[in-house]
């Protein structure tokens, strides 16, 4: 997996280069702040054909998200399926030169933060429900805990996939 730092990408742009940048964040995250020349293709909503339509064989395609985790996942999924070269932008939008970013609309909560809030809320709800409503509701907390263990072991996030499709995460 090829990598470039966000500051190196910023330098390329400032020197007049026009790199092909694909931002894999949700439409709402993209609408709030993004590189003006980037294309928004949210993770899990596209395949190799979408990138092939934008890039020629041999081109470098820079994948970015808020930090770099989602970009890494997309890069792993698409490796070997394209004739172009995928490059992950380390540090993502958080590390790009602020003067280069287009900021529009309201600030949105990042997907990882939404997942932590949802998981924590479900655990609290399960414990409170177990004490005050019915003991079987403790199972909700156990289910969420098992989901977090699964997420950690597989380095995937099913809850994040669901939350990314919610209306407030669309532009």
Image (cartoon, rainbow, N blue to C red):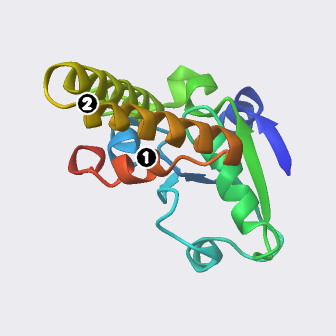
Picture quadrant of residue 80: bottom right
Picture quadrant of residue 168: top left
Which residue is identified by label 1?
Answer: 159
Residue under the point 73% across and 31% down: 11
SS assignment at label 2 = helix
Q: Which mark is residue 33?
A: none
SS assignment at label 1 = helix
The picture places residue 91, in percent across and down from the top left corner, at 67, 29
Asked whether, in this view, residue 102 is left or right of residue 107, the answer is: right
- Quick one: label 1, few (<14), some, or many (20+) residues within 10 Å? some
- Quick one: label 2, few (<14), some, or many (20+) residues within 10 Å? few
* Cβ–Cβ under 8 Å for marks 1 and 2: no
Q: CA distance from mark 1 to mark 2?
A: 25 Å
Number of numbered callouts drawn: 2
Asked whether, in this view, residue 143 is left or right of residue 14, the answer is: left
The picture places residue 44, in percent across and down from the top left corner, at 51, 62
The picture places residue 143, in percent across and down from the top left corner, at 43, 41
Q: Nearer the viewer, residue 95 or 150?
A: 150
Residue under the point 44% across and 53% down: 161
**Residue 17 position (above or below residue 59):** above
């Amino acid at each position: 997996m090829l990598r470039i730092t966000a500051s190196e990408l910023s330098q390329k742009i400032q020197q007049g280069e026009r790199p092909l940048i694909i931002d894999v964040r949700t439409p709402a995250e993209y609408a709030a702040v993004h590189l003006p020349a980037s294309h928004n293709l949210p993770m899990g909503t596209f395949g190799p054909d979408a990138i092939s339509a934008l890039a020629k064989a041999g081109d470098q395609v820079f994948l970015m998200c808020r930090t770099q985790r989602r970009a890494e996942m997309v890069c792993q999924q698409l490796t070997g399926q394209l004739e172009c070269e995928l490059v992950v932008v380390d540090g993502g939008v958080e590390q790009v030169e602020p003067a280069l970013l287009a900021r529009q609309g309201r600030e949105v909560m990042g997907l990882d933060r939404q997942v932590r809030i949802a998981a924590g809320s479900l655990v609290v709800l399960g414990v409170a429900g177990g004490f005050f409503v019915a003991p079987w509701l403790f199972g909700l907390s156990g289910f969420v805990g098992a989901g977090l263990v699964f997420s950690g072991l597989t380095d995937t996030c099913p809850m994040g996939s669901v939350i990314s499709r919610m209306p407030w995460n669309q532009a």
